[in-house]
Image (cartoon, rainbow, N blue to C red):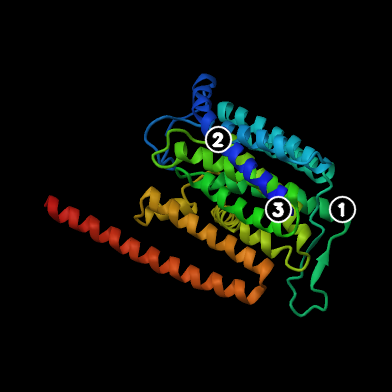
Amino acid sequence: MTTKDFWCLGFAFLLSFVLSLATTPLAKRVAYIIGAVDIPRDSRRMHKRPIPRCGGLAIIFGFMASVLCFGPPTRGLAATMIGAGIIAIMGVVDDCKNLDAKLKFVIQIIAALIVVYGGDFKIEVMTNPNIFSDSPYIVFPWWLSGIVTVLWVVFITNAVNFIDGLDGLAAGVSAIMSVSLVFIAMRSGEYSVAVMGTALMGACFGFLPFNFNPARIFMGDTGSTFLGFMLASLSIQGVFKSYAIISFAVPLLILGLPLFDAMFAMFRRILKGQNPMTADRGHLHHRLIDMGFSTKQSVFILYAISGVLGITAVLLAEKGTLMALGTLCAVLIFIVLETTMGKTSNKNTKVEEENEED
């Protein structure tokens, strides 16, 4: 990438950040007007008062404006923007009317098909899980490639939506994941992916001052499904195509936090005989809260985990498996130790407070 490209990426970040920051108060007003307000009615909600939930409009506006200004006019970019626009409209309507889950799946599949076939982006190669095989990777036939890619986009779209349960969590984690995608895109010369990732990063950071605990506005499904859709779309455009041998491991690491949370939640619900899409209080962020951590502590723990996974993905792409695994193990052990100490500290503090009251 040239020096001009790096300057463009810097301006793309700045523009999306400023526009998202400036339009979030406007999105808050719009949310009240259209009735997109989150009223806490069950134990899953962490807030105690009604909060507007259409803040994703500010993220979308900052992103779209930045990409239109600095993105290259390509077929792939156009297909991605059209698909993202469909997801954005669906999210706004869902925040107001609570759309049926089946209808949302249909809309998400349509948007994914536009990106996959309109932009000609498919997951055609993946790492061979059979370590004893002579072939280091598997090549999908054309028909299976399309199915796998659509399923990937739809799953990630909903996975990011699942983690949107604490103030600042989805926006911060999405920004962290975008950083990893942008870095790999720049190293592989994928300017279009780098611009979209940078714009997404800036829009998330611009929204965070209003969404961090205590949140004054939520992004709602408008923002979370949009972020999930964009992260999934960027991963199939850049990461999967750039590293054939490790094409499956890199995006799995980058998007590892929402992927694990979504898969764990679905398996847990299936084992209980429930609909896998039924909402419950069993996500990772809920478990951290139940362990005694505050909202801010839980969010920072998940930020750290997402950051470690992103760094590991970059090292895997740049330095190889050994360096990546060593870093992952070392940092995760550190996080576990810090989390355990933090939990113990929280318990001791509560005990001291109870003793003082007595």
Q: Which mark is residue 18?
A: 2
Between residues 259 and 74, which one lies in front from this camera angle?
A: 74
**Image point 48% across, 59% down: which residue?**
304
Q: Are marks 1 and 3 in contact (CB under 8 Å)?
A: no
Residue holding disc 3 = 235
Q: Which amino acid does label 3 sit on?
A: Ser
Badge 2 amino acid: Val
Q: Where residue 79 sits in the image (x, y, percent)?
A: 79, 39
Q: Position of residue 237 (x, y in %)?
A: 76, 51
Q: Which mark is residue 143?
A: 1
Taking 354 as reference, is 115 above or below it? above
- Location of the N terminus (image quadrant): bottom right
Q: What residue type is labelled 1?
A: Trp
Upstream in sequence: badge 3 or badge 2: 2
Determine the residue positioned at 88% across, 59% down.
141
Question: Is residue 289 toward the left or the right of residue 315 in the image?
Answer: left
Residue at the limit of the structure toward the top, as seen here: 33
User: Which residue is at the far right?
Assistant: 142
From the viewer's perspective, is the residue at label 1 or at label 2 nearer? 2
Does residue 275 appear anywhere in the picture? no
Q: Are marks 1 and 2 in contact (CB under 8 Å)?
A: no
